Image (cartoon, grey):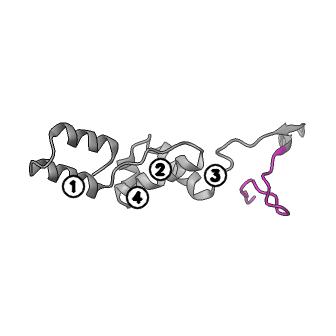
Amino acid sequence: MVRKNLPVRCPACEGPLGVKVLFCPACGTEVAGQFPLHEFALLPKEHLDFLRLFVKARGNLKEVERILGVSYPTVRARLDALLRALGYEVEEEAEPEARLAVLEALRRGEISLEEAVARLREGKS
């Protein structure tokens, strides 16, 4: 038997689908009502696949990086995209170049240690 993904959008109007009937294949019992789909059921396949791998790797981003064969920033970007798809706010980090610019300005004595720490925390260069 080929398993298909649960449709989450109406084929006629593209509106979100809900669940109206649940069925037990073992005994044939049906339960009717209005059941909303949870946020994981609404994820596109690419996000769901990443989530499964993330859980399998016990949240270890370095392990996800190794398994996928991609860079750490790519793994972080995929995790951030997953979090956004689930409706969570994602804190934006400073780009590595911006962080390096702050550290270089500190090394040259252009800014104080306190200012460098503040800029790094704020994500500014």
Counting residues from the N terminus, which is met first, the one under dot 3 or under dot 1?
A: 3
Counting residues from the N terminus, which is met first, the one under dot 3 or under dot 2?
A: 3
Q: CA distance from mark 3 to mark 1?
A: 37 Å
Q: CA distance from mark 4 to mark 1?
A: 22 Å
The disc label shown at residue 43, or none: 3
Mark 3 in CB contact with mark 4 (< 8 angstroms):
no
- Mark 2 crowd level (few <14, some 14–19, many ≥20, 10 Å Cα): some
Counting residues from the N terminus, which is met first, the one under dot 1 or under dot 2?
A: 2
Q: Amino acid at mark 3?
A: Leu
**In the rendering, at what x and y percent does residue 4 appear?**
73, 58
Q: Quadrant of residue 58?
A: top left
Label 1 secondary element? helix
Q: In the picture shown, does residue 33 fall above or below 54?
A: above
**In the rendering, at what x and y percent does residue 78 appear?**
47, 55
The disc label shown at residue 79, or none: 2
Q: Which residues are magenta?
A: 1-19
- Mark 4 crowd level (few <14, some 14–19, many ≥20, 10 Å Cα): few
**In the rendering, at what x and y percent does residue 13 appear?**
83, 61
Q: Amino acid at mark 4?
A: Thr
The disc label shown at residue 74, or none: 4
